[in-house]
Structures are given as C-alpha cells and as structure tokens.
Image: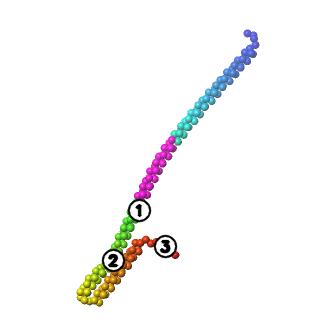
Amino acid sequence: ILSNPYGMWRNARLAAWGGGAVAAFLALLSVYLWQRRRSVRQISLARNALQEANAQLERRVAQRTDELRLTNAELVSEMHERQVAQDELLQAGKLAVLGQMSAGISHEINQPLTALRALAKNTSKLLSAGRMEDVHENLNAISEVTERMGSITAQLKSFARKSPGEYQA
C-alpha cells in the first residue's frame, strides 16, 4: 500500500492520452468520412442534375430544329406557290397583250380587206360597163391597198423576230 503510485499514475496518464488520441483520431476519421460521403453525394446529385439539364436541352434543341425544318419546308412551299402564281400572272399578262394586239391587227388588216373587196366588186361592174379608165384607177387603188397590207405584215414579222441585240453607241 505504501508503494510509490507515480508509475501507475504515469501509466494511467499515458493510457488516457493514448485513448484520447485514438478517440480523437476515430472522431476525425468519422467526420472526414461523413464529409466525404456528403461531398460525393452532392457531386452525384450535381452530376445527375447536369445530365438532366443536358438531356432537357438536347430535347429542346431537337424540338426547335424540327420546328425550324417544318417552317423552312413551309417557306419553300410558299416560295414555290408564289413562283407558280407569278408565272401564271405573267402568262395571263402575255395573253392579255396578245388579245389586244390581235384586236389591233385584226382592225388594221380588216380595213384594207374591206377596201379590196369593194374595189374588186366595183372594178368588175366597171369592166362590165366598159369604163376602162376607172378600171385602171381601181386596179391602182387595189395595188396600193395590197402594199399597205404588205407593210403591216412586214412590221408584224419584224416585231416577231428576235433581234440580235447588237450594241449601238
């Protein structure tokens, strides 16, 4: 009983310090593992959220691309319809001009033909009556009318021909 307790106290202190150090190490280790698990979970959640956002963005891009393709196809279709309508309007304009031209041409040629018919009937009657001088006048008038018709048709022919498009200074 009277022995020196100093060695025992020292051993007890060392054991307490060792136990405290092990407990502190285990506490730090558990805090580290808890923090690591928490950060790994946060990284996993962030990765999943990023993948979901990326997938959603890809879906939106694909949807928008489909909408743009559809809009582009509609625009191409409208352009084609406009081109067809424009061609039809151009053709209608050409036909209208052609109708006006044919009316004018018909009028210009009909007058000399009517004069020729009247002169021919008149010449026949004059020939039957023996009025040769009047017959010569009618034949000269017929010749002039045919020349006029020739000039009208010559103008139409020159209008219908394609010009070479030569440059003139």
Does the magenta portion include 64?
yes
Residue that label 2 marks: 109
Residue 73 falls inside the magenta stretch: yes
Mark 2 / mark 3, whichever is N-terminal? 2
Distance between mark 1 and mark 2 Cα atoms: 34 Å
Q: Judging from the image, what secondary structure is the residue with disc 2 in? A: helix
Q: Mark 1 sits on what residue?
A: 86
Cα distance in 3D space between marks 2 and 3: 32 Å
Q: Residues within 10 Å of mark 2 (few under 14, many from 20)?
A: some
The kind of residue on which mark 2 rests is: Ile
Seen at 49% across and 73% down, the residue is: 166
Q: Is residue 78 above or below residue 160?
A: above
Name the amino acid, label 1: Gln
Mark 2 or mark 1, which is nearer the start of the sequence? 1
The image position of residue 29, as x and y in percent, is 63, 27
| View extreme (left): residue | 128
Q: Is residue 136 above or below residue 15?
A: below
Q: Which residues are magenta?
A: 55-83
Residue position marked by numbered label 3 in the rendering: 166
- Coordinates of residue 130 in the picture (x, y in percent): 25, 89
Task: Assess whether mark 3 and mark 1 are in contact (beta carbons under 8 angstroms).
Answer: no
Look at the numbered discs 1 and 2 and tell me whether their residues touch, using CB distance below 8 Å: no
For the residue carrying disc 3, how many other residues have a C-alpha within 10 Å: few (<14), some (14-19), or many (20+)? few
